[in-house]
Amino acid sequence: DVKPLFVGFNPETLVDYIATKTPDLATRLGGKPTDWKVREVGDGNLNLVFIVEGPQWTCVLKQSLPYVRCVGESWPLTVDRSWFEALALKEEGRLVPQHVPEVYHVDRSRALFVMRYLEPPHIILRKGLIAGHVYPLLADHVSTFLARTLFSTSLLALDTAQHKAAVAKFVVNVELCRLTEQVIFTEPYAQAANNHWTSPQLDAEAAALRSDVPLKVAITALKKKFTEQAEALVHGDLHTGSIMVTDTSTQMIDPEFAFYGPMGFDIGAFLANLILAYYSQDGHATSPGARNDCKYWIAKTIIETWALFAEKFVDLWSKFVSLESPGDLTPTLLFGTGDRTLAEYQKAFLGDLFQDSLGFAGAKIVRRIVGIAHVEDLESIADPDVRASCEKKALAFGKVLLKERSQFESIQQVVKALEPKG
Ligand code: ADP
Ligand code: SR1
Ligand code: MG
Ligand code: MG
Ligand code: MG
């Protein structure tokens, strides 16, 4: 019930704000306000991101705009998303502090928060993948983030009262959910002014999406899960542009779309963006096969992410049950130790989650090729024919994940299908 009062900052007003409203941060920055350097570095679709550098310390201030930045004022969007982003960062930070930037200050009325500066050599994962870099710890780190955040906020760890209270806290982030419904689950399959694609190369593929009845049934079944299944606290926008990395550090940023939704939405988002990175590698290769090592590593990372996630998730779950502190979905009365019901139910649960994750991955791939917001992995391929060739492969695979995912019984089979035979 706090009405945000939007005051968009410029570097000068921002310095004044920090100096007068956040004395602790001002002290940490050191020197005088006139010594602080402010740079706006936001390269995302929605918000302002300022790096504030003092003589002793640097921090990041993120502020929401009352509209979608990449579109402009014609598309209003609540600035209160900033509050939910900070709330989610704090909750995720409690569960996996090693993979989330610390939040130092939140001001809901000004739609801003201040967080840790992820210093160089941290870069956005998507940019690293475009450059052909590999990150050997990525699957381990992302699977830890996913397993801990999704398990710990679900009814497998919480009792019903705790879970419903948490659902209620995030249910207000409705405008962001509706944006996702629009741009991921509806527009790519319809005539929509926001849609665009590499034309004329992909004209036939885009038209085919609009007349594919089984595909529209499949995407709507996933939309039903997205809108109705308040399973766990999901990040809500876990693409490779929402992850900052070094060789040894992996940090999840930008959870402004956070809400209680289906677990597979986050897993699928990450896998989809690895798949997009995979298919774009040939477009970045300076000679045939030059990116094969990178493609191999991405394929391996897809396998390891799911495999490690499943292992860590089940491990957490079994520990909770054996400690006699399971959530209300699997009470000790029914799932006591030594009872094979737990192992059977875990197998069924993980099987369903695998299918959901593949479906959401398909949805995330399709939207990045024909919807409003594309990905730099593909957009930065300058030659439109080369780009279109990568996009066609990715789009075809996205459709397989949406319509035929039940054929896949393992993540290894999924990866094998990335390169169709013949
Ligand atoms: P948006 O919500 O607009 O997508 P992001 O949170 O993704 O904004 O941030 C946009 C960019 O700002 C990122 O791509 C990254 O380059 C930079 N950035 C965001 N948070 C941090 C941080 N904590 N430390 C360093 N750079 C950051
Ligand atoms: C208007 S669509 C903008 C997109 O950018 C965000 O990062 C989300 O992915 C959203 O769908
Ligand atoms: Mg972003
Ligand atoms: Mg941390
Ligand atoms: Mg964002």
Image (cartoon, rainbow, N blue to C red):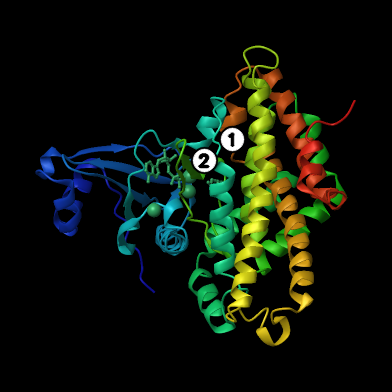
256 with respect to 322 (left or right): left
Residue drawn where x is 55% and y is 51% of the image: 237
Q: Please name whichever residue, 78 or 369, is drawn nearer the observer in this view of the structure.
A: 369
Residue 193 seen in the figure: no
Determine if the C-beta at disc 2 is less than 8 A from ligand 3: yes
User: Which residue is tagged 2?
Assistant: 241
Residue drawn where x is 85% and y is 44% of the image: 211
In this view, the residue farthest toward the top is 287
The quarter holding residue 327 reads: bottom right
- Find numbered disc 1 in the image and state the secondary structure of the residue it sits on: loop
- Find numbered disc 2 in the image and state the secondary structure of the residue it sits on: helix
* Neighbours of disc 2 within 10 Å: few (<14), some (14-19), many (20+): many
Q: Amino acid at mark 1?
A: Val
* Neighbours of disc 1 within 10 Å: few (<14), some (14-19), many (20+): some
Please identify the quadrant where the N terminus is shown.
bottom left
In this view, the residue farthest toward the front is 338
Residue 134 place in picture, x, y as percent: 56, 31
Cα distance in 3D space between marks 2 and 1? 9 Å
Count the marks: 2
Q: Amino acid at mark 2?
A: Gly
Residue 115 place in picture, x, y as percent: 33, 52
Q: Please name whichever residue, 222 or 370, is drawn nearer the observer in this view of the structure.
A: 222
User: Which residue is tagged 1?
Assistant: 375
Residue 161 seen in the figure: yes
Where 97 sits versus 59, above or below? Answer: below
The quarter holding residue 246 reads: top left
Residue 218 place in picture, x, y as percent: 81, 54
Residue 232 place in picture, x, y as percent: 59, 67
215 with respect to 82 (left or right): right
In this view, the residue farthest toward the left is 32
The quarter holding residue 261 reads: bottom right
